[in-house]
């Protein structure tokens, strides 16, 4: 099926069904930027207008599926695109919180079912990020160098941002 003017069209037979597309709002940031901290307040604020999800909510099912293999992050992103499309069929856009970037969705067939993607970067100073990561429970990863590098990359590629130093 292919999207066309509010419908999904079968390229083989031409059969059509209603298929609404809505925007996908991606709230991104490296670990320690405040994504988890804003999840509940954001969901309460947007609850009637937009469904809010955390990318991590699919980690456990995908871990089961992966067994002893590494997680397939492209499949996880594709699953969230499918969920966003399903939410759109109910007339709502989706907000997804996760450490995501536009390039991770390029060329993904399910992205055609999203009207457009908007990225918003949650960001804090590196020292604040380091303190937040150090304050996490022991079972959480403390990959400081990787997260600082990812934060730097996101700063250079996501224009819209919110400073979370004081949150």
Image (cartoon, grey):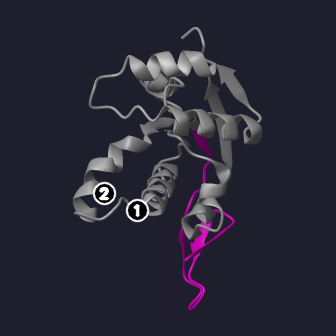
Q: Is residue 6 magenta?
A: yes
State the quadrant of the N terminus. Answer: bottom right
Q: Which residues are magenta?
A: 1-26
Q: What residue is shown with label 2?
A: 62
> Residue 151: horizontal and vertical position, in percent?
62, 34
Mark 2 or mark 1, which is nearer the start of the sequence?
2
Q: Is residue 110 above or below residue 126?
A: below
Dividing the picture into quadrants, the one containing residue 122 is: top right
For the residues marked 1 and 2, what is the alpha-carbon distance in whole angstroms? 8 Å
Left or right: residue 65 compared with residue 42: left
Q: What residue is shown with label 1?
A: 72
Q: Is residue 60 above or below residue 48?
A: below
Determine whether label 1 and label 2 are within 8 Å by CB.
Answer: yes
Left or right: residue 136 compared with residue 83: left
State the quadrant of the C terminus. Answer: top right
Give the structural element (helix, strand or loop) at label 1: loop
Residue drawn where x is 58% and y is 8% of the image? 166
Residue drawn where x is 57% and y is 45% of the image? 100
> Residue 97: horizontal and vertical position, in percent?
50, 37
Q: Is residue 16 above or below residue 18?
A: below
* Label 1 crowd (10 A; few <14 / some 14-19 / many >=20): few
Left or right: residue 78 compared with residue 7: left
Left or right: residue 117 compared with residue 19: right
Q: Is residue 4 visible?
A: yes
Q: Furthest-front residue in view? A: 145
């Amino acid at each position: 099926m292919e999207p066309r003017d509010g419908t999904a069209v079968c390229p083989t037979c031409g059969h059509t069904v209603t298929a609404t597309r809505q925007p996908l709002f991606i709230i991104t940031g490296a670990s320690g930027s405040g994504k988890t901290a804003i999840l509940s307040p954001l969901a309460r604020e947007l609850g009637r207008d937009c469904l809010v999800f955390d990318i991590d909510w699919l980690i456990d099912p995908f871990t089961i599926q992966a067994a002893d293999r590494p997680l397939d992050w492209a499949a996880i992103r594709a699953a969230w695109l499918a969920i966003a499309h399903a939410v759109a069929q109910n007339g709502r856009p989706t907000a997804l919180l996760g450490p995501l970037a536009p390039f991770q969705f390029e060329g993904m067939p399910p992205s055609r079912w999203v009207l457009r993607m908007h990225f918003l970067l949650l960001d804090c100073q590196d020292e604040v990020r380091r303190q937040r990561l150090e304050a996490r429970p022991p079972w959480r990863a403390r990959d400081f160098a990787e997260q600082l590098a990812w934060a730097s990359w996101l700063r250079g590629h996501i224009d819209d941002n919110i400073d979370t130093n004081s949150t």
